Image: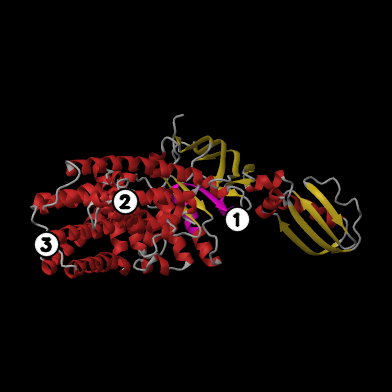
Amino acid sequence: MAYKFKRKGAHLNFAVEVKGLRKTFVSGWFRKRRVEALKGVNLTVPAGVFWGILGPNGAGKTTFLSILSNLLTPEEGEVRILGRDVRTDSMELRKRINLSSGHANFLWSLTVRENLEYYSMLYGLSKTDRQKKLEELFHLFDLSPFARVRFEELSTGTKQKLSLAKALLNDPELLLLDEPTVGLDPDVARRIRELVQKLHREKGTTILMTTHNMKEAEALCEEVAFIRGGMIKARGRPQDLKRDLRLGDTIVVTFRGTLPSSSLEGLDGIYGLQCSDSSCRILVDDHRERLSQILDRLTGAKVAIHDLRIQESDLEDVFIAFAQ
Amino acid sequence: MKMYSSLLPNELIKTRAFIYKNWTMAKRNVFTLFEILFWPVVGFFSVGLLTEFAGMQPQMKAFVLVGVVSMGTIQVCQLDVAYVLLYDVWSKAVKHGFIAPVGIRHLLLGSLVVGMARGAAVFFLLMGASYAFFQFDFRVPGIGHLALFLFGLFLCASTVGILVCILVLIFGNRADVAAWSLVSLMLLVCGIYYPVSILPEWVVPVAALIPLTYMLEYFRQFYGFQPIFSHPLAKGYMLLLLYLLLEISFMKVALKRAKKSGLLLRLSE
């Protein structure tokens, strides 16, 4: 397949194509223990998108990302990254991808600048390119005040910024983020999210991110895949998944007066209805589309509304639905 | 940005990355200064003074001092080769190195350069001390023979260092103890303090498999010791070449195995 990568408006194709991917870990020298981590994963990720891999602990997210980043060899199945086979073109691929993971570790007694110098040399950057790149990354991640600070002395947030900076040294076409905000303070996590989003927006980098944080996935990812027990259980845009699972939004109305039981019957997009003497809980597919009709019916029934609340379902609900 | 210009500079930059890492890490750690100065110097003087106490003849003293100086040089040089992986293992940063587009050749060559620099520092320091304190002159065989001997020592050290890396890629960080113990095992069989000829008969074939045995035999012949093996230099270098080729292949296999078993990831956790 002729591969064309979408970058700055170029032709769109797949950044990741995975078919029938299986991975089993075997441990123990004498008494072998086998753990099947991936059980036939199929996934295609278009180039230029921000994609999320979600799933509970031990679902196989990190294993999946590690295979994509060439740190693990697949046991079975086909894995193509940027149009190339991970088994046969690994050296070429490693020039074009990079990985940043949560709880990042780097050479502990090197400073931030020294660590970035070292890793940029691993990517073959010349001295001039290194200087230019490092300045750009120092600026982007506000790392200049820490340039001479040793890795072991950095805060968790700064370590994470360094991890992201390292992952951008080679201007990767595919950036793999393994729980990039895990263990960070909320303000630092938000800053990291903003930086990643900016990078995706401005450079068109394909980003594949694993996360436990559903709010984060919803805010960043154009599409997500749910992985559980080593298999992809669902994939799609967050709003489509919510619709498919009929999770919808809940509208809670409190009123004064008597509401005839038939008042809300026959409305489109209603998944469920629970009414008592003074309140109703209405589960709808999308509150933005259904609210006005519901209010019309309530007003028509001559009840006085004195409170109205909307509870939007989010990816967390989708996550729970898939995890159960 | 023009990142991957031409092949040769690219290769050199990647090799230089490992020189940079080992050198900078070495500069940061007081412990590495001990490795260069403390242990080799302590070992050298302990053995040197023992030769004085035992009233050894100059020829016997030469035998022992060549052994002890070689040992110190190899120990320091092989540590650098092993450290190229161990620094990452101890920092739990192994995956970041192996996700980058570098090959084993960059890693080994870069670390060997630093190992040779530090090994040469130890060798010349102890060579000077031998002359100053024990009136033993390493320059007797001539610069050419000295250079061949020293380079042989560096290659011996690299075979040990690569073996440590292979063991770490197979057994994980528990194998780091090999970085200090393998050389001590060599001490027993390859004639550091005594000639191979006094070893039990069944041990001599083992000694014959170790290139250092030949290097020591080669250098000591200039001080009047008849080698028990013929053509020691040629045999030593041939064995070194063979072992290096085998070890590089084994290291590639060990790396593949570590990627298959997940050890590479576990070394980063």
Judging by the rendered image, the residue that carries numbered circle 2 is B160
Mark 1 lies on a secondary structure that is loop
Q: Residues within 10 Å of mark 2 (few under 14, many from 20)?
A: many
Instruction: Give the total of numbered labels.
Output: 3
Q: Amino acid at mark 2?
A: Val
Q: Are marks 3 and 1 on the same chain?
A: no
- Mark 3 and mark 1 in contact? Answer it, CB < 8 Å: no
Chain ID, mark 2: B
The numbered dot on residue A212 is 1
Q: What residue is at 20 percent from the left and 51 percent from the top?
A: B216
Mark 2 lies on a secondary structure that is helix
Q: Amino acid at mark 1?
A: His
Q: Position of residue B191 (x, y in %)?
A: 24, 53
Residue extending farthest top: A1
Q: Are marks 3 and 2 on the same chain?
A: yes
Is B30 on the left-hand or right-hand side of B176? left
Give the residues drawn in magenta, as a range. Answer: A194-221
Judging by the rendered image, the residue that carries numbered circle 3 is B58
Is B103 on the left-hand or right-hand side of A315? left
